[in-house]
Image (tube, grey):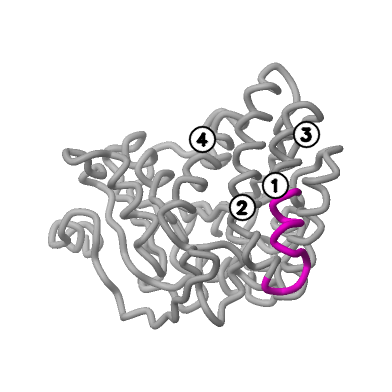
């Protein structure tokens, strides 16, 4: 009962755990983390891109998770970003208590602005400020379902066992842990996109990040002690809704390319003029040449 009484004490949308010390800076007019492996900005514009990416994945997969959930009582969203996944889960499971945590509430603020002056998150959702690379601020066996998606841009390869291990620790026996991530960056015949994607891959490798995390997900779950581990993979940008998915994916990648341009220039990978030309090339080439993306969900049960 401690979890539910704790929720009743919490104010709408936010509760702070221990302070999360972070150093912020600005690069090319975008708010970024300093001394962090995270490769993308952390600001309201990035929040909009993340919401677009969420809707793309939901369109491609048909729902928000691969695990067969029935009546979860408590759900955890690790590194929840804008909170859009947690918000939809709270609506889908109105009897469940949903917690999302992240080390920065800026994307959440952007999401609240999109909802408008009268908008709010469902009453059964709460946000906590906490760091996924540290011990999660929850007791053992608190949740029925722990979920993380697209955490590869900030979780170094060496720290994935910690994150998955913490997800397992806070999930009760017979509950599920699920992680979803890509099989690498999207693929396109576009020369402009390919050049920027190769630069992104080099940047991720230099920061010790997985560039193709999907291939490791199932084994990470097994090593954390999960059982009945399964995988579901979708190819985004193919099939009946290929045109719609490719349009959304192209917009996602165009936004990401613009966001990363200042870092590319600072590191000497491209000049500003070269970045501008590549982004313009992407805008013209992707709708004509197409783009696809492989995405995998892996999940398992806590014994």
Question: Of marks 3 and 1, which one's residue comes earlier in the chain?
Answer: 1
Question: Could you say which disc has been placed on residue 258 in the image?
Answer: 2
Q: Pointer 3: residues within 10 angstroms few (<14), some, or many (20+)?
A: some
Q: Answer left or right for 30 relative to 236.
A: left
Q: Between marks 1 and 4, how big is the CA–CA gap?
A: 23 Å
The N terminus: image quadrant: bottom left
Q: How many marks?
A: 4
Mark 4 and mark 2 in contact? Answer it, CB < 8 Å. Answer: no
Q: Residue at x 34, y 68 (%)?
A: 129
Residue that label 3 marks? 285
Q: Position of residue 83 (x, y in %)?
A: 38, 50
Question: Of marks 1 and 4, which one's residue comes earlier in the chain?
Answer: 4
Mark 2 and mark 1 in contact? Answer it, CB < 8 Å. Answer: yes
**Was residue 4 drawn as part of the magenta stretch in this picture?**
no
Q: Answer left or right for 277 relative to 245.
A: right
Question: Of marks 3 and 2, which one's residue comes earlier in the chain?
Answer: 2
Residue that label 1 marks? 279
The residue segment tinted magenta is 266-277
Q: Between marks 3 and 2, how big is the CA–CA gap?
A: 16 Å
Mark 1 and mark 4 in contact? Answer it, CB < 8 Å. Answer: no
Residue that label 4 marks? 55
Dot 3: element: helix
Q: Between marks 4 and 3, how big is the CA–CA gap?
A: 23 Å
């Amino acid at each position: 009962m401690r979890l539910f009484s704790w929720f009743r004490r919490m104010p709408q949308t936010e509760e702070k755990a221990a302070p999360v010390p972070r150093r912020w800076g600005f690069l090319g007019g975008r708010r970024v983390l300093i001394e962090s492996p995270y490769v993308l900005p952390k600001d309201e514009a990035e929040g909009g891109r993340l919401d677009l990416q969420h809707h793309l994945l939901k369109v491609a997969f048909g729902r928000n998770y691969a695990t067969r959930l029935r009546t979860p009582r408590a759900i955890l969203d690790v590194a929840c970003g804008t909170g859009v996944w947690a918000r939809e889960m709270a609506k889908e499971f109105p009897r469940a208590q949903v917690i999302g945590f992240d080390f920065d509430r800026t994307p959440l603020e952007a999401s609240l602005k999109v909802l408008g002056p009268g908008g709010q998150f469902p009453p059964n959702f709460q946000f906590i400020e906490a760091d996924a690379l540290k011990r999660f601020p929850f007791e053992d066996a608190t949740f029925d379902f722990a979920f993380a998606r697209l955490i590869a841009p900030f979780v170094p390869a060496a720290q994935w066992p910690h994150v998955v291990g913490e997800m397992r620790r806070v999930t009760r026996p017979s509950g599920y842990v699920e992680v979803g991530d890509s099989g690498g960056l999207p693929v396109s015949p576009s020369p402009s996109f390919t050049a920027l994607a190769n630069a992104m891959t080099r940047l991720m490798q230099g920061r010790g990040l997985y560039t193709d995390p999907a291939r490791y997900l199932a084994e990470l779950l097994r090593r954390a002690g999960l059982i009945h581990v399964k995988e579901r993979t979708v190819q985004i940008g193919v099939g009946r809704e290929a045109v719609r998915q490719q349009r959304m994916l192209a917009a996602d990648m165009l936004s990401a390319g613009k966001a990363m341009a200042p870092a590319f220039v600072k590191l000497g990978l491209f000049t500003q003029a070269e970045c501008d030309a590549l982004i313009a090339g992407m805008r013209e080439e992707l709708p004509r040449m197409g783009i696809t993306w492989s995405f995998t969900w892996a999940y398992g049960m806590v014994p």
